[in-house]
Image (cartoon, rainbow, N blue to C red):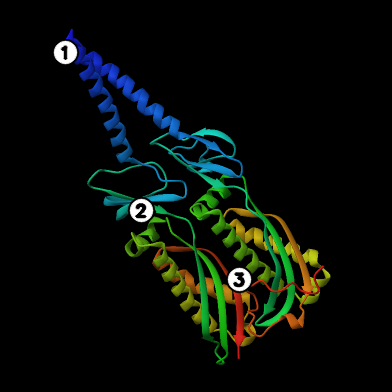
Amino acid sequence: MGQNIILGLAIGLFLGSTLVWGLLIFRGLVRVSPGHFLAIQRSNSADPAAGPLGFAHSGRMLVIPLFQSGQLYPSEFPEIKNEALRITHLGNPLLDCSLTLRVKLIRKPEPLTRFVQTLGGLGIEEIVRIVRIIAENGTHQVLASLPVDRSLSAPDQAKARLREHLDEELGSVGLQVGEVSLVVRPVHAQAHRSDDSEFSMDRVLEKSPFGE
Amino acid sequence: MQPDIMGWVLGGVLGVLFIVIETFMIGRLLRVPLPHRFLVVTGGRHNRGGKTLGFRIARKLTYVIPVVEQCREIDGSCIPCRIEVRNAYLPGGVRVKASLFALVRLSTDPALAACWIERFLDRPTGDIAQVSTETMEGAARQVLSTLAAEEVGDLTFLAGMADATAESFRKLGLELVHLSVSSLRMEA
């Protein structure tokens, strides 16, 4: 009887561990879907410079159950567009402009870690909303700091400064500018109402008659 | 024959049970946060840079002593804050309206984390956003009250804000990840 219990125990341990670990490993297999990347929290990293996070951009990965954790995060973001952005300085309208922006991830461990640790817990809609506000505020800041004539006569220069500014601002959350398009127009006096804020992220002004 | 089978079955059930309980226990003792989260383990004493702290912060696999230590998983993502400042005054009595946008997050630096752990542990994110917003509103009023009308601009305002908020945020254990001006206008 005693010998049978020991043998049964051994078989039970073998079967139990096979079953439990089989189930855990099955649950730990993650398929990285398009438009996402997988971040894995590891206890030890082969590359010390990469930090405790590992990343996978496609295929299937095993997140070792109990010892690692993994989560999928968005890697592609929809285009941000604002056709009627009014730039003013202390309430005086300076310019109207259209901004189209596409942001992307920097596929290096350090910026990816920064992205995960600053925006990872937010949904894609919230991330896009934050990027939109940063982009619109940045556009306002860059164009308001340039002479109006220069913005109108050398829009490429304004665009280059905007890209540089946005790369720096978005870099703090692990993102960078993919494509940016900026169309600057002289302000149409009639379009400005006294109750318009000089720069409002909520309000989309009517399309300027100076538009293309 | 019957007792033989009973022995096998009993051994087998005990074996499976042992593995299940063992896996469950390992799961309870070893904690690993999601990549965008971190663990705050309270209880026990931890030495950090010559200081004894009653907590430790872990971003990777960590061992939690049952009963003695308590573990909480905290979301380290940024908290967006929109700051509206109305009726702020410049030195000459000029009224200014400002609108700012900020991204704030909890610091994981153990020296600063003690501050937010005291204030915000187990509190909803909304409370952190509210305290941050009110702190920045106060700082904005303070900065604007020192700027001459001809000096007022996004860059001077932002530079002043960075200085004015640094100490307050350090005391709160928060990090200012981003700050930008949405609007700044003088009112009649």
Q: Nearer the viewer, mark 1 or mark 2?
A: 1
- Look at label 1 and name its amino acid: Gly
Residue at x-position 45% and y-position 37%: A44
What secondary structure is marked by label 1?
A: helix
Whether pointer 3 and pointer 2 mark residues with C-beta atoms closer than 8 Å, the reply is no
- Residue A1 x/y as whole percent: 16, 11
In the picture, residue A212 is in which quadrant? bottom right
Task: Please report whichever mark, 3 or 1, sits nearer to the chain's N-terminal start.
Answer: 1
Which residue type carries mark 3? Asp
Q: Chain of mark 1?
A: A
Chain letter belonging to callout 2 = B
Q: Position of residue B124 (x, y in %)?
A: 38, 62
- Residue B34, given in percent of the width and then of the height, sits at 44, 46
| A212 versus A174 height, above or below | below
Horizontal side of B172 relative to B88 (left or right) equals left
Q: Nearer the viewer, mark 3 or mark 2?
A: 3
* Quarter in which the N terminus of chain B is drawn: top left
Q: Is residue A193 left or right of residue B38?
A: right
- In the rendered structure, the residue with mark 3 lies on which chain? A
Q: Which residue is mark 3?
A: A202
**In the foreground, B67 or B160:** B67
Q: Which mark, by number, is residue A2?
A: 1
Q: Amino acid at mark 2?
A: Gly
User: Dot 3 lies on which element?
Assistant: loop
Q: CA distance from mark 3 to mark 1?
A: 77 Å
Instruction: Name the element at disc 2.
Output: loop
What residue is disc 2 on?
A: B49
